[in-house]
Image (cartoon, rainbow, N blue to C red):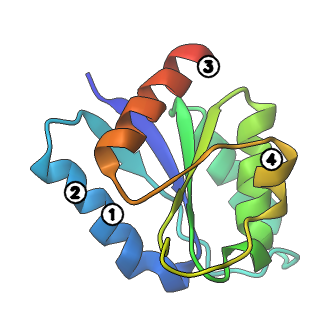
Amino acid sequence: MPWNVFLSFVEEDLHMAEKWWEQEQHEDINLAFADYPVKKPFDGPDAEDTKNNIRELLQTVSVTVVLIGRTTYTSKWVDWEIRASAEMGKGLLAVDLHPESEHIVPRALKDFRVEVFGWDIKETAIAIEREARQAS
């Protein structure tokens, strides 16, 4: 049975996120990824419905993995997803999508002292399993 993992990232990193999680298909790794694309404003009229939908999805996962791109730190949605995951007792870790360049780590990741990993899905999968076991 795979570990269920919620992926939190900004829309502009979708292509990089797809490349990252496609590594799983080429390795002997048993992960099931889910995400919730949000195109609505964080403070908009539908924000509470979106938050409730994300909370329902988070109930089904063991770990939230934040995919850090160049502008992830600016996303109120990513910040909220990190904090909601922590409040629900989900494991948390992060992956640097652009390790070759400097960028800012989202505040919530710093607040919860979340470990940041490089691009290697094998290393991240080991950490996901560790976090999932601790969260259960």
Give the answer, above or below, for where 38 lies relative to 132: below
Amino acid at dot 3: Ala
Identify the amino acid type marked 2. Answer: Gln
Horizontal and vertical percent for residue 123? 37, 41
> Sequence order check: which comes first, mark 1 or mark 4?
1
Q: Which residue is mark 2?
A: 23
Image quarter of the C terminus: top right
Q: Earlier in the sequence, mark 4 or mark 3?
A: 4
Identified by mark 1, the residue type is: Trp
Q: Secondary structure at mark 3?
A: helix
Label 4 or label 2, whichever lies nearer to me, is: 2
Of pointers 3 and 1, the one earlier in the residue sequence: 1
Circle 4 sits in a helix, a strand or a loop, which is it?
helix
**Three-letter amino acid code at the position of disc 4:** Arg
Q: Identify the residue under disc 3.
A: 135
Q: Quadrant of residue 102?
A: bottom right
How far is the residue under mark 4 from the one under mark 2?
27 Å
Disc 1 crowd, CA 10 A, few/some/many (<14, 14-19, 20+): some
- Observer-side mark, 3 or 1, equals 1
Q: Earlier in the sequence, mark 3 or mark 2?
A: 2
Q: Which residue is mark 4?
A: 83
123 relative position to 64: left or right: left
**Mark 3 surroundings: few (<14), some (14-19) or many (≥20) residues within 10 A:** some
| Tag 4 and tag 2, C-beta contact below 8 Å | no
| Cβ–Cβ under 8 Å for marks 1 and 4 | no
- Residue drawn at x 60%, y 32% as measured from the top left: 59
> Image quadrant of residue 118?
bottom left
Q: Nearer the viewer, residue 48 or 75?
A: 75
Q: Secondary structure at mark 1?
A: helix
